[in-house]
Image: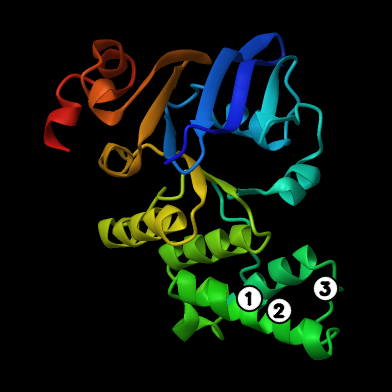
Amino acid sequence: MSDAIMLEADSITKVFGGVRAVDDVSMQVREGTIHALIGPNGAGKTTFFNAISGFAMPEHGQVRFKGVDVTRMMNWRRVAMGMGRTFQTPSVFPELTVDENIRLGVRAHANHAFRLGALRGEAKRAVDTRVDELLGFVNLADQRDRPLAELAHGSQRLCEIAMSLSTDPVLVLLDEPMAGLAEAETDRIMGVIRDLRLRLGLTVLFVEHNMRVVLSLADRITVLDRGKLLAEGAPAEIAANNAVRSAYLGEGVLDHV
């Protein structure tokens, strides 16, 4: 774990129809950490995520990625700098196979045509190798030829994570990666998130409601409530924070996770 700051949000404010969905929120994500962003529904988590990743421009504040001001930078340029992202609803192509979904991401990053079969020679072999690596990383190699629509929701999530890795990011943003998953699928995704850091050396920022997951994975937790920063700290600090319990978790919720 490094002391270097990978991502910094400084006084971010985002307004929709006169309502401050995110109100003067600051946060630092250190290189090599797994950082969780939590809060009740309507707390502003996804809006804050969108401001960080370039899908929404804040009215006020600054976003710095690897020390560079990216506040007004388009999302695709942030991707080119090394920022990967998944969404609450899996952003995949269900009619295509697992292999084809991941291959589209790899080829797009390599600045090649999207048409299947368009690559030749060394470039095609490089893409094939990268696709194999990503399939192996998320443990979907045995399902590579199946249409994504036939797979369990957890496997679809894993495919989306693999697609986010196709751009060779240094920072991965995961928006509720465990939403709607059974416990076994959740544990599977948790293992992959741990491996993002342990095996690939990546930094991870994720939104999640499952507190067992958050307390197990996160090195540091940021809590939003009604668009404002409520608390930030290590898992043990957040678990013991009365304001967090009252606003989000409820008394006693953390006693059993």
- Answer yes or no: is residue 216 visible: yes
Q: Earlier in the sequence, mark 1 or mark 3?
A: 3
The secondary structure type at the circle numbered 2 is helix
List the residue tagged with mark 3: 114
- Across and down, in percent, residue 257 comes to 17, 38
Q: Is residue 16 left or right of residue 8?
A: right
Residue found 67% across the figure and 37% down from its top = 53
Q: Is mark 1 on a helix, strand or loop?
A: helix
Q: In which quarter of the image is the N terminus?
A: top left
Element carrying mark 3? loop
User: Which amino acid type is shown beneath numbered disc 2?
Assistant: Val
Could you say which quadrant of the image residue 237 lies in? top left
Mark 1 touching mark 3, by CB under 8 A? no
**What residue would you read off at disc 2?**
127
Is 6 drawn above or below residue 120 in the view shown? Answer: above
Task: Locate residue 18, reporting x and y percent.
Answer: 70, 8
- Marks 2 and 1 in Cβ contact (< 8 Å): yes
Upstream in sequence: badge 2 or badge 3: 3
> Label 1, on which residue?
130
Query: Quick one: label 2, few (<14), some, or many (20+) residues within 10 Å?
Result: many
107 lies left or right of 220: right
Q: Which residue lies furthest to the bottom in this view?
A: 121
Q: Position of residue 120 (x, y in %)?
A: 84, 89
Q: Can residue 97 be seen in this view?
A: no
